[in-house]
Amino acid sequence: MSEIKFTPWEQRKAIIDSWKTASNAYPLTISIIIYLIFVYIVLPKFMKNREPFNINFIIRCYNVFLIFACFYFVFQFRKYGLRFRRTWQCFNSFEDREHNMKEIDEVVWWFTMLRLFEFIETVFFILRKKFDQVSFLHVYHHIGTVVCLYLFTKHNGGIMGIYFGAINSCIHIIMYGYYLISSFENMRKFSNLIKPFLTAIQITQLSLLVGQSISALRPSCKVPKFLFIIQGLNVLYLIYMFSKFFIKSFMKGKNKKKEMKNKQ
């Protein structure tokens, strides 16, 4: 009986499929359903007649943990040669011999688990009765990120696929640093000043990923095109939503303040 010869991707796929949480979409789908049930039904009912919980210490610990975790993933991604100047460069998923893709797959999967862990952030909002922060944008962004990461790991996004994780980690270091600062009452004024810049950085990150998606769709770039179509559509929608939020929260607010001053 002749020996079966596996391509590098076939070998990696066999390893990925051996991971219980990655072999099929059921664990991720169940996690998302549970998250939605708790966020929209269970927790709001639980908090209906209760005072907001004081969980500042837990939130600070959570933010510090995520800052260090994101730093770890940035260093891991850099170890495998990722550089921002190469974000729009094509790396053929099916012909990658330069990188140890098995190790990279493991790093990306742990990064996906970290993003799944971030679902708890919404729980914190509800326990503090910050219901306005549990917006559609917030929930969609959390779920969309995890789904995209799962698809890229499962369907051979290759080196190009992990640029999403690298860029996202850098932005989240800034974002969780902001959350940590804003948890201190005497730092609120400063955190409110930098809040618009945080949204602007998010939009810039998403714009970089739109460019990468366009680059991946070139006929000469041998990557699974459907992954980058999904990524492109997802980030375009997020750009629209974040831009809408930016205009509503910061631009219109400034205009209203100017109108009030003119009336006085």
Image (cartoon, rainbow, N blue to C red):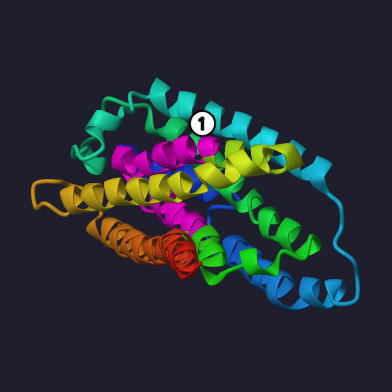
Between residues 97 and 46, which one lies in front from this camera angle? 46
Residue lying at 86% horizontally and 73% vertically, measured from the top left: 46
- Quarter holding the N terminus? top left
Left or right of 36: which side holds 3?
left
- Residue 24 location, x and y as percent? 53, 60
Q: Does the stretch in magenta take in 170?
A: yes
Left or right of 106: which side holds 166?
left
Between residues 8 and 152, which one lies in front from this camera angle? 152
Residue lying at 41% horizontally and 21% vertically, measured from the top left: 79
Density class for disc 1 (Cα within 10 Å; few <14, some 14-19, many ≥20) is many
- Residue 176 location, x and y as percent? 60, 40
Residue lying at 40% horizontally and 39% vertically, measured from the top left: 167
Q: Name the residue under label 1.
A: 73
- Residue 156 location, x and y as percent? 34, 48
- Residue 135 location, x and y as percent? 58, 69
Q: How many marks?
A: 1
In which quarter of the view is residue 9 placed? top left
Residue range corresponding to the magenta coloring:
145-174
Secondary structure character of the magenta stretch overall = helix
Is residue 4 visible to us here?
no
